[in-house]
């Protein structure tokens, strides 16, 4: 079974509306997210129903920008909390290393644990960068797809049924 939505009814059901008049900002975001899974002909017919597609496109871009900002801020806060916790562990391990009653074996153990924590900090940084890359790729692809379809719709309005450009007559 294909994941491609091949009818307007399937698209409306996927975004949770019964009629295109009910396309709110939230539902527009849902529409943008399912757009890659919509048959191109169906997508064009749907977009043609929007009298102000450029206004909707700008709205989509603003919504995507807000989603990006929120996701990045959440990731930043999570990273800060994790790194602060790792720093606290490092401080505790460092304090343990300063004790004079430790054997060389104990010192080695605490030093190894500090290295493990430092590695986890590096891994957290790598995860953050990977998350940002995936986020930008996903959102960029959705926006590009929506704009390409919109440009196709707008361009199709100027081509007659014989394939002649109506603007150059």
Image (cartoon, helix red, strand yellow):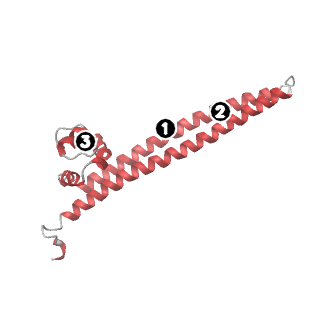
- The numbered mark at residue 86 is 2
What residue lies at 85% left-to-right and 29% top-to-bottom? 104
**Lower sequence index among marks 1 and 3:** 3
- The numbered mark at residue 74 is 1
Dot 1: within a 10 Å radius of its alpha carbon, few (fewer than 14), some, or many (20 or more) residues?
few
- The numbered mark at residue 88 is none
Contact, mark 2 vs mark 1 (Cβ under 8 Å): no
Residue hosting label 3? 24
Quadrant (top left/top right/bottom left/bottom right) for the N terminus? top left
Quadrant (top left/top right/bottom left/bottom right) for the C terminus? bottom left
| Left or right position of 10 against 59 | left
Q: Is residue 166 above or below residue 105?
A: below
How far is mark 2 from mark 1, CA to CA? Answer: 18 Å
**Quadrant of the image occupied by residue 102:** top right
Dot 3: within a 10 Å radius of its alpha carbon, few (fewer than 14), some, or many (20 or more) residues?
few
**Quadrant of the image occupied by residue 52:** bottom left
Residue 163 location (% of width, % of height): 16, 70
| Residue sitting at the far bottom | 169
What residue lies at 17% left-to-right and 38% top-to-bottom? 18
Contact, mark 1 vs mark 3 (Cβ under 8 Å): no
How far is mark 1 from mark 3, CA to CA? Answer: 25 Å
How far is mark 2 from mark 3, CA to CA? Answer: 43 Å
Q: Secondary structure at mark 1?
A: helix
| Residue sitting at the far left | 161
| Left or right position of 157 against 66 | left
């Amino acid at each position: 079974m294909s994941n491609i939505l091949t009818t307007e009814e399937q698209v409306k059901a996927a975004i949770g509306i019964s009629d295109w008049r009910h396309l709110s900002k939230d539902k527009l975001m849902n529409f943008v997210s399912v757009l890659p899974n919509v048959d191109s002909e169906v997508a064009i017919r749907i977009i043609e129903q929007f009298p102000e597609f450029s206004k909707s496109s700008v709205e989509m871009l603003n919504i995507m920008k807000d989603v990006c900002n929120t996701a990045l801020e959440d990731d930043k806060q999570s990273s800060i909390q994790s790194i602060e916790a790792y720093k606290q562990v490092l401080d505790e391990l460092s304090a343990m290393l300063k004790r004079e009653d430790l054997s060389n074996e104990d010192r080695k153990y605490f030093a190894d644990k500090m290295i493990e924590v430092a590695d986890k900090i590096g891994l957290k940084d790598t995860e953050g960068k990977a998350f940002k890359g995936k986020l930008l790729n996903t959102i960029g692809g959705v926006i590009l797809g929506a704009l390409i379809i919109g440009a196709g719709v707008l361009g199709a309005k100027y081509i007659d049924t014989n394939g002649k450009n109506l603007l150059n007559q």
